[in-house]
Image (spheres, rainbow, N blue to C red):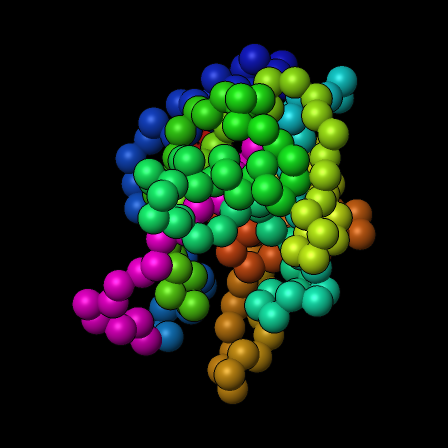
Amino acid sequence: MEKVDTYDRVRRALDQSGPGTSDFDLNPADARRENRTLRPAAVLLALLDTASGPRVILTKRSSALKHHPGQIAFPGGKVERGDGGAVRAALREADEEIGLHRGNVEVFGTLPPHETVTGFGVTPVVARVRRPFGMRPEPGEVAEVFSVPFSHVAEPANFQVQYRFWRGRRRCYFTVPYGPYYIWGATARILRGLAERLAP
């Protein structure tokens, strides 16, 4: 697949209308509070050009973190008051967490927010990295920065549904393993949502 064609398909996918994703998609029996207020957050789904095709930049969170230690995640975090919205928040977090300067990013658009079971509304910001850069994990928060082929996570057939028990209940979730990396939970669900939009 040509890179230009891939980016064109991604842009068209972002233009599609449709609902957001959530941690409840595979767990409809789990109760959600009515009139709930979600805390805004944003992540950067960044595509990096390589000789073999675009790749998605991901991070492995530090094992010392209190929340989600060691998990695979996009660069991102809470939308702060001074950010001025999800796009700027995602770019700020990517700069802080992996050393990707916002001037080196071409934003394509956003996917509808993903609702997490922990009460966040996470806006995925989809973008292309303009030039190669030195990936720099933020000490204390990011253990590793790596990338996976976009062709792998853009194929719905590569996703699996697994489950584990959380707070005494069985919870199902998507996974899209790649090599030594176990990509699951909200990160996998967001990628699956984009893959569904890209499907012919």
In this orientation, does residue 3 appear?
A: yes
Q: Position of residue 185 (x, y in %)?
A: 55, 59
| Residue drawn where x is 49% and y is 44% of the image | 43
Which stretch did the figure color magenta?
A: 31-46
Say whether residue 148 is left or right of residue 130.
right
In this orientation, does residue 20 appear?
A: no
Q: Nearer the viewer, residue 196 or 72?
A: 72
Q: Position of residue 133 (x, y in %)?
A: 70, 25
| Res 62 → quadrant | bottom right
Q: Position of residue 31 (x, y in %)?
A: 32, 75
Q: In the figure, 158 relative to 171: above or below?
A: above
Q: Nearer the viewer, residue 185 or 156?
A: 185
Q: Indicate the quadrant containing the N terminus: top left, top right, bottom left or bottom right.
A: top right
Q: Position of residue 150 (x, y in %)?
A: 63, 32
| Residue drawn where x is 25% and y is 67% of the image | 36
Q: Which residue appears farthest toward the front when viewing the image?
A: 82
Q: In the figure, 73 relative to 55: above or below?
A: below
